[in-house]
Image: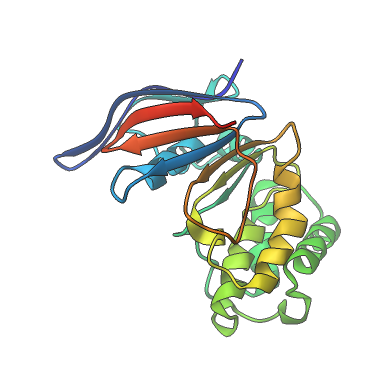
């Protein structure tokens, strides 16, 4: 059974068509690497698969239900199962580290503030930002802001992880934290992982399938031995 499925998907930017009638199936538990040269559409595909970008045409299914793009309860119900780590995602500048981490739960759940505080405390420990929880993002280092965004978008019960290159250029101490937390979760057999393939020694991950793009077209889809 498909887990995420693209059916006849097209993406256009003004007069430029990147994808046309794209079909793709990702099955539950697959560990997939997406590769392609600059401009091939890797980042757009990752955003499509995470539900962050609506296609111009066609349909994207998550667990056999079409993605919902209006910001309402069905939207957040679907996104609850997806953790995504994208380059363009940023913390909210005028909120503290604590409030950035709490915002998702305050807006999209019925959790009491006590429960939210417990969840945020775990995420602060995970990111090593306990002592900076009252700071605004501008007072953090670049690596700390990147990790804050990662932890913000990490759903503790998520079984789908979509990773752009944002995690690959961090310093060793931050990489070690990611490996002990997020990566260990991603390795679980039931978790579906879709990540950009780049030449990085920082994060090694055991993907079993590679999809190669060129100019908005899948040119290779192979099992990695």
Q: Is residue 160 above or below residue 199?
A: above
Q: For the image shown, how many numbered marks are present on the structure?
A: 0
Tell whether 99 sits left or right of 200: right
Question: Which of the 4 image quadrants contains residue 152?
Answer: bottom right
Q: Is residue 79 above or below residue 1?
A: below
Q: Position of residue 214 (x, y in %)?
A: 30, 37
Q: What residue sits 58% from the left and 33% below the top?
A: 74
Tell whether 216 sits left or right of 207: left
Q: Position of residue 48 (x, y in %)?
A: 43, 38
Q: Colour scheme of this structure image?
A: rainbow
Question: Which of the 4 image quadrants contains residue 102?
Answer: bottom right
For the C terminus, which image quadrant? top right
Closer to the camera in the image, 2 or 204: 204
Q: Position of residue 123 (x, y in %)?
A: 76, 62
Tell whether 17 sits left or right of 187: left
Question: Which of the 4 image quadrants contains residue 126?
Answer: bottom right
């Amino acid at each position: 059974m498909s887990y995420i499925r693209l059916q006849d998907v097209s993406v256009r930017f003004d007069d430029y068509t990147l994808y046309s009638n794209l079909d793709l199936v990702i099955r539950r538990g697959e560990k997939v690497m997406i590769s392609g040269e600059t401009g091939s559409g890797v980042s757009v595909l990752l955003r499509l698969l995470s539900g962050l970008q609506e296609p111009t045409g066609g349909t994207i299914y998550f667990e056999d239900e079409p993605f919902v793009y209006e910001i309402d309860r069905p939207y957040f119900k679907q996104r609850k199962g997806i953790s995504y780590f994208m380059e363009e995602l940023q913390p909210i500048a005028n909120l503290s580290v604590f409030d950035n981490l709490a915002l998702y739960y305050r807006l999209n759940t019925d959790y009491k503030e006590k429960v939210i505080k417990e969840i945020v405390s775990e995420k602060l420990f995970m990111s090593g930002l306990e002592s900076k929880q009252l700071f605004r993002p501008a007072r953090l280092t670049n690596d700390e802001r990147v990790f804050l965004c990662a932890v913000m978008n990490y759903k503790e019960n998520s079984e789908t992880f979509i990773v752009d290159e944002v995690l690959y250029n961090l310093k060793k101490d931050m990489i070690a934290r990611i490996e002990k937390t997020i990566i260990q979760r991603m390795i679980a057999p039931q978790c579906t992982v879709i990540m950009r393939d780049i030449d990085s020694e920082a994060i090694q991950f055991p993907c079993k399938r590679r999809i190669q793009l060129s100019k908005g077209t899948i040119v290779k889809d192979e099992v990695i031995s």
